[in-house]
Image (spheres, coloured by chain):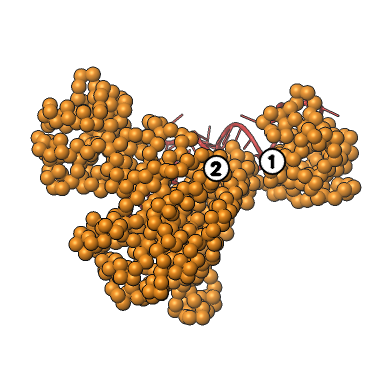
Chain colours: A orange, B red
Amino acid sequence: MSEKTSSWKRTCFSVEITKESLGKTVTLAGWVQKRRDHGGVIFVDLRDRKGIVQVVFNPDSGGDVMKCAHDLRSEYVISVTGTVGLRPEGTLNPALKTGEIEVTASSLTVLNACAPLPFVVEDDTDVSEELRLKYRYLDLRRPSLRSNLVLRHRVAQVARNFLSDEGFIEVETPMLTKSTPEGARDFLVPSRLNGGDFYALPQSPQLFKQILMIAGLEKYFQVVRCFRDEDLRADRQPEFTQIDAEMSFVESDDVIAVMESLVEALFKEAGISATAPFNRLTYDEAISRFGLDAPDTRFAMELVDVGSIVAGSGFKVFAAVVAGGGVVKTIRVPGGAKLSRKDIDELTAVAATYGAKGLAWVKFTPDGWQSPIAKFLSDSEKSAIATVTGAGEGDLLLFVADSLDVAATALGRLRLFIGKKLEIIPEDTFNFVWVTDFPMFGYDETAKRFTAVHHPFTSPLDEDLPLLETEPMKVRSKAYDLVLNGVEIGGGSIRIHDPGVQSRIFTLLGISEEEAGQRFGFLLEALKYGTPPHGGIAFGLDRILAIMTGAESIRDVIAFPKTQKAVCLMTEAPSRVDNAQLQELSLRGLRKKD
RNA sequence: GGGGCCGUAGUUAAGUUGGUUAUAACGCUGGCCUGUCAAGCCAGAGGGCGCGGGUUCGAGUCCCGUCGGCCCCGCCA
């Protein structure tokens, strides 16, 4: 196809060519980003993994080479040998790292052609994600996506190096493991050798890492895939990656201290400064001030409780909720009085999504209170509300009266919604906060039983141990989450290392001794044999990278992600299998073969 | 399980109150062109509107169903 005067093997990458290479002969290999054919001279932007450089073909290159260059198309794979030269004055391209130089080709080898593309391989493409996922290999050629993968690699390396330097041992734990019905839905794997039995893919290596502590590893870590068969979101994939760690002979503060340094190191790799120690909030504080257990602390607009002010109010809706044990909370939207009725309707709809039955509002206008509820409130109530919220002219107050859970969630979400809409959340700010002292238990109204908020192996606070049997809902745990800009990026706890306490927790969760034995017998057994106090944490690598890269979805930091229906559009997994395969696994297909 | 948005050439979109041969840009194909980098100029090909029903004289346009993508609620110890 062209003269073979030299090998097609690359001598350097595009971006390695500098002005110091002037006059040198180089061989480049890569993809044709763009061809600009002027007839007598042809420019080709050659892209390799590291960047782009302009290659020039002119009649001096030889007739064959010109003809061959003329036939080049986007994404052809080529090798070019040529001489590095300065670009003529006035033809520099400041947009390119290599914009001052160019390579004048003396030979060209087409290593492979490329079929017409389903979409243009460029960062500034607005092609649908559906198509991008189907042709993921083309999508990944785009520099922005590739740089996400590169950063992911670097961050994972930093994690490994850091933890290794801190004395953590990376241990691989099984991917084929035991199903534990607690928690998320398991992905099941049928066992051929034990027909009718199933493995589960791990939701996390939780039990294994605890057992590694019992085994005396003292410090364990793993960059590990986890699987949960639940519905997907922008920040949730059925398989995702955790930086998982566990330590022995530690309390919460010990884990937090090491992990803060790790997080500093990870974010430094992305050019983001995270300065430890990070702020801390208890769960109760987080809920009461921000409404959510993953508070976005980049902006204020905190929740204010006005329950005591309106407890005896003429506004029966408020008074009744307080009398019934509920709360009345409000947020002040600075300058929010300019919002239209339609805007407020929208906010009401948002609040309704999270279960709020209504959204009361007050606009502070030059003429005083403008509000559907103003007439029900006394002057002293109004002034108390203004004082406690700090509301002044131009502001808007939004109230939700409901159970603590609903009111906090609705206003907490509303706070985020308004923060985004009014663009009052500062960008390029990274606010880390530890949320601690989570409640041990939640209550499942439908199943009429207690559930573990974190997981059943989380240790209660020592001082709350006596409340286990008397007031379980008041028991707090030694759990901690790391929250960044309103996103939970990690969470962990000090574990129970006392089999007696572990049994009490199982009893409370309504897990019988027999059941506990079936599900976690190996752990309960192991706990008897000299278990050190231990605890750990796991970070969501995908979420961390999404924040670092500004990605809207973790799909943009995962090489081969799945769609919302958990389908890989490239491989078309999941798919049907042969009946023969099923039979071998003692399974029967439920769907007819079409 | 539920709510919302979307689906028209290869791609991204426009398609008035349902009305002749469905538009545009980019891309693609061919030609011209020695300094472009959103190259330029000329010519050209390409879809029957995700799929299936229905209403109608007539359906991208209305109705029903279905498939797919995205966002969210539930779910995610």
Question: Quick one: SS at disc 2?
Answer: helix
Q: Which amino acid does label 2 sit on?
A: Lys
| Separation (CA) of disc 1 from disc 2 | 23 Å
Q: Which of marks 1 and 2 is in front?
A: 2
Q: Which residue is drawn at 42% across and 43% down?
A: A278
Q: Is residue B30 left or right of residue A215?
A: right
Residue A26 vs A250, above or below: the answer is: above
Extreme residue in the top direction:
A366
Between residues A27 and A63, which one lies in front from this camera angle? A27
Residue B25 vs B49, above or below: the answer is: above
Marked residue chain, label 2: A
Q: In this view, does A359 lie to the left or right of A417?
A: left
Q: Residue at x 41, y 74 (%)?
A: A529
Q: Name the residue under label 1.
A: A51
Q: Which of marks 1 and 2 is nearer the N terminus?
A: 1
Q: Which residue is drawn at 61% across and 44% down?
A: A147
Tell if the residue under mark 1 belongs to the same chain as the one under mark 2. Answer: yes
Marked residue chain, label 1: A
Which numbered dot is residue A268?
2
Q: Can residue A311 be seen in this view?
A: yes
Q: Which amino acid does label 1 sit on?
A: Gly
The mark total stands at: 2
Expressed as whole percent of the image width and height from the top left, the position of residue A305 reads: 22, 38
Between residues A320 and A548, which one lies in front from this camera angle? A548
- Dot 2, crowdedness within 10 Å: few (<14), some or many (≥20)? some
Q: Is residue A32 left or right of residue A142?
A: right
Q: Residue at x 59, y 42 (%)?
A: A144
Question: Quick one: SS at disc 1?
Answer: strand
Q: Are the residues tagged 1 and 2 within 8 Å (C-beta)?
A: no
